[in-house]
Image (cartoon, rainbow, N blue to C red):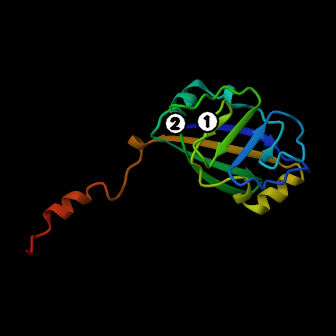
Amino acid sequence: MLHETIRAYGHPMIRATHRTTFEITKDPYLTPRGDCIIGVNADKSADDLDPRVKDAIRRDDAIIIIVLRVGQVQDMVLAQGSKKLQLSDQRRIVVRKSAYVEPATLAIRANKAARDINRVLVDMLKEEAELILDIYILGLDEVCSPYKNIGSIINDFPNTS
């Protein structure tokens, strides 16, 4: 499992109402149109990520867990990697519910967008609180299921026919 931490800050204009994405940006500001933005003044963009992290994210079987933290309040987002990810934008990081890819896309097929994020966390971001994103990347080969050997149980079950 690989891990990367990104720090950003809230802003009074954060609305976090977008239905399909959320974004953090290195820019120190946002406009009313930026309804997907949840953090500004980020210390990293997609291009700044560790090369090992980028390689792990660029796997079709990559599972991406993003923990969003503001103080003691947190939320978690699950998403997927892809070999199509470019991870080359020098200002932004975007997480998407869709499979659309562009240079800022960090992850696709996410289970949450901006509007789905914990509203207590969003309210704290409106007060310009620090946002910490802990990004964890796992490959399917690193995930162990308690049902891994279920096939043997089914195969060993007596045939009643």
Determine the secondary structure under disc 1.
loop
- Compared with residue 26, is residue 125 higher up or lower down, i.e. above or below? below
Viewer-closest of 71 and 12: 12
- Compared with residue 30, is residue 74 higher up or lower down, i.e. above or below? below
Q: Residue at x 77, y 48 (%)?
A: 36
> Badge 2: few (under 14), some or many (20 or more) residues near its Cα, within 10 Å?
many
CB within 8 Å, label 2 to label 1: yes
Viewer-closest of 28 and 83: 83
In the picture of the structure, the residue carrying the numbered disc 1 is 101
- Which numbered marker is on residue 22? none
Quadrant housing residue 91: top right
Quadrant housing residue 46: top right
Image spot of residue 16 (x, y percent): 79, 53
Image spot of residue 88 (x, y percent): 66, 25
Image spot of residue 83 (x, y percent): 50, 31
Q: Residue at x 77, y 57 (%)?
A: 121
In the picture of the structure, the residue carrying the numbered disc 2 is 82
User: Could you tell me the amino acid type at mark 2?
Assistant: Ser
> Image check: 146 left or right of 44?
left
